Amino acid sequence: MDFEYEADDGGGFFWIRLNDVGRNHRLVRCPFDDVRPEAFEEFLPHRPDVMLSGVEPFENTLIAFERVGGLERFVVHDLRTGASHTIVFPEAAYTAFPDINAEFSQGITRYTIECQLRITLNKHGADI
């Protein structure tokens, strides 16, 4: 297995998605000034049945882009309370992917969804 990682600015620390313990990746964070593995704080563990395909950090929330059973799901994690919820998509068969979310402090995430049964491409926003 080739080692892969991806780091995102989290406003004072890095969010790092890496596959050091399994191919489906896990998510850790660490301070900007200490990126040693010993400084990693695990946020989402590796899960054999869930592919962590990416993250989008915001000031008070983090969106985890996951794939389960062949379908994408977007899980919103509230960094203030520790609560989380999944954005519900309107169809049973779909493709979803994040859109441009340039503002770190915004309270909405933008994404695109393509519903396979109706062959439509729609851009959506969800309060986070």
Image: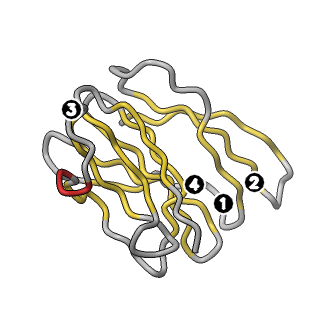
Q: Residue at x 59, y 27 (%)?
A: 100
Asked if disc 1 and disc 2 are in contact, CB closer than 8 Å, the reply is yes
Question: Which residue shows up at 41% across the image and 68% down it?
Answer: 20
Alpha-carbon span between mark 3 and mark 2: 43 Å
Q: Earlier in the sequence, mark 1 or mark 3?
A: 3
Q: Residue furthest left?
A: 81
How packed mark 3 is, by other alpha carbons closer than 10 Å (few <14, some 14-19, many 20 or more), is: few
45 lies above or below 76: below
Amino acid under disc 2:
Cys
**SS assignment at label 3:** loop
SS type, badge 4: loop
Disc 2 is placed on an element classified as strand
Identity of the amino acid at label 1? Glu
Quadrant where the C terminus is found in the figure:
top left
Q: Position of residue 67 (x, y in %)?
A: 56, 65
The number of numbered discs placed on residues in the rendered structure image is: 4
Find residue 115 and name its label: 2
Disc on res. 105: none
Q: Earlier in the sequence, mark 4 or mark 2?
A: 4
**Are the two marked residues, 4 and 2, in contact with CB atoms closer than 8 angstroms?**
no
Residue 9 horizontal/vertical position (percent): 37, 31
Question: For mark 4, what is the residue?
Answer: 89
Check disc 4: other Cα within 10 Å, few if <14, some if 14-19, many if 20+: some
Q: Which residue is mark 3?
A: 33
Residue at (20% x, 39% y) in the render: 34
CB within 8 Å, label 1 to label 3: no
Give the Cα separation between the discs numbered 1 and 2.
6 Å
Q: How is the image coloured?
A: secondary structure
Q: Which residue is mark 1?
A: 91
Q: Are marks 1 and 4 in contact (CB under 8 Å)?
A: yes
Q: Camera-side residue: 93 or 100?
A: 100
Instruction: Please tell me in which quadrant of the rendered image residue 86 appears.
Output: bottom left
